[in-house]
């Protein structure tokens, strides 16, 4: 009984060339695609992509709106907590703070 004979390099090259030629012949044998059918297929694909992009944009906008609303609520809660934690300032203290802010602004402009 004969053992397994490994194909030589030339055999592998010729087998690859035959396979390439067979694939090319199969590709050339296909009927050409009707331009109207191809255009319709491309239009449907474009419409599908546009609808998908629109849906993604809507979902993204909804997420952004929810996140902005959440941030606004957190900010309001923080401001309320700060207002509750601060003791009411007297008129003189508010004037001193306002004057300090004014002086700081003037110093930055120089």
Image (cartoon, rainbow, N blue to C red):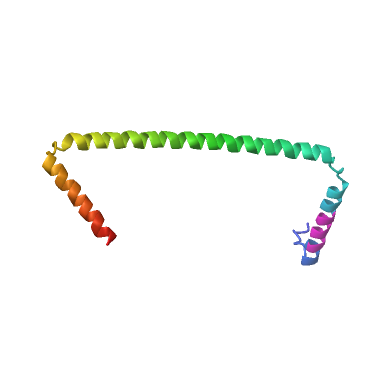
Q: Principal SS element in the magenta part?
A: helix
Q: What stretch is highlighted in magenta?
A: 13-21
Q: Does the magenta stretch include residue 16?
A: yes
* 35 left or right, relative to 90: right
Magenta stretch: includes residue 2: no
Residue 4, image x, y percentages: 75, 58
Out of 103 and 78, give the one closest to the viewer. 103
> Image height check: is 50 above or below 100?
above
Drawn side of residue 88 relative to residue 104, left or right: left
In depth, the one of 45 and 85 nearer the eye is 85
For the N terminus, give its image quadrant.
Answer: bottom right
| Foreground residue among 22 and 34 | 34
**Closest to the observer, 89 or 1:** 89
Q: Name the residue rendered at 82%, 60% in the picture.
A: 17
For the C terminus, the quadrant is bottom left
Q: Where does residue 19 sit, x and y in percent of width and height?
A: 81, 55
Residue drawn at the location 30% of the way across and 37% of the way down = 75
């Amino acid at each position: 009984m004969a053992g397994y004979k490994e194909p030589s390099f030339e055999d592998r090259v010729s087998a690859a060339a035959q396979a390439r030629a067979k694939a090319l012949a199969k590709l050339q044998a296909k009927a050409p695609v009707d331009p109207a059918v191809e255009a319709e297929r491309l239009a449907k694909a474009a419409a599908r992509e546009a609808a998908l992009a629109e849906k993604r944009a809507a979902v993204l906008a909804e997420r952004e709106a929810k996140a902005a609303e959440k941030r606004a609520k957190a900010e309001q809660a923080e401001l309320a907590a700060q207002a509750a934690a601060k003791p009411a300032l007297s008129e003189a203290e508010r004037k001193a703070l306002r004057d300090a802010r004014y002086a700081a602004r003037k110093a930055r402009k120089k």
